[in-house]
Amino acid sequence: LNLTGLAYNEDTYEQLFYGIQSLKNLNRLYLNLSYCTGVTDKCLARLSEAIEHLRFMKRIQLDLVGCNEITDKGVEDLVRGLKRLRGLEYLWLSFQGCEKLTDKTFNSLKIAIPQWEKLTSLHLDLGETNQISEEAIIKFEKSLTPYLNLTDVVINSKKDINRFPSAMSDRKS
């Protein structure tokens, strides 16, 4: 569902997320809210509530490019719903240009990853998130090495780095 650049208010998002929540057998979700007005932490908390009802979900791609009102709290709320999806295999989160995100964003993800036993692919786009440090990215990458199913990791950072942790690639052999 590509809703790029549209202007929304809280009621509109509530209707959208109620609709998503009612699709109980959905196993793939692509939601592009890039540059949409009104995407806030409260919006992500409500999206989280909707997603946690989708028990058959295997693939999620969520694009939030340029949603400048999102903070670490919004990501924490979003991940709280995502971590209930035990069958999740593929996760793509784009926070490019979400300028209020900091290193704390990784704390939520670190806690959630052990819940996703079937996760094989993780893509994070953090371009133009100037408050996320290179050190936090490296530390996050290292925290991924124990997860044997996780074989495809791409993290794009503000320095336009594509990463695939060497410790993960060494495991494959």
Image (cartoon, grey):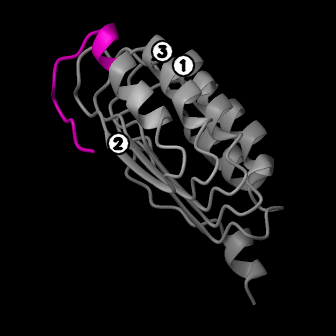
Picture coordinates of residue 78, whole percent (x, y): 57, 29
Q: Where is residue 17 in the image (x, y as percent from the top left)?
A: 42, 27
Residue drawn at point x = 48 percent, y = 27 percent: 47
Residue bearing the label numbered 3: 41
Say what secondary structure mark 1 lies in. helix
- Image quadrant in which you'd find residue 157: top left
| Disc on the earlier residue, 1 or 2 | 2
95 lies above or below 164:
above
Which amino acid, by three-letter code, is at mark 1?
Ala
Q: Give the residues in magenta.
A: 1-13
Q: Where is residue 163 in the image (x, y as percent from the top left)?
A: 53, 62
Residue type marked 3: Asp
Residue found farthest to the left: 6
Q: Is residue 50 left or right of residue 61?
A: right
Q: Nearer the viewer, mark 1 or mark 3?
A: 1
Furthest residue toward bottom: 173
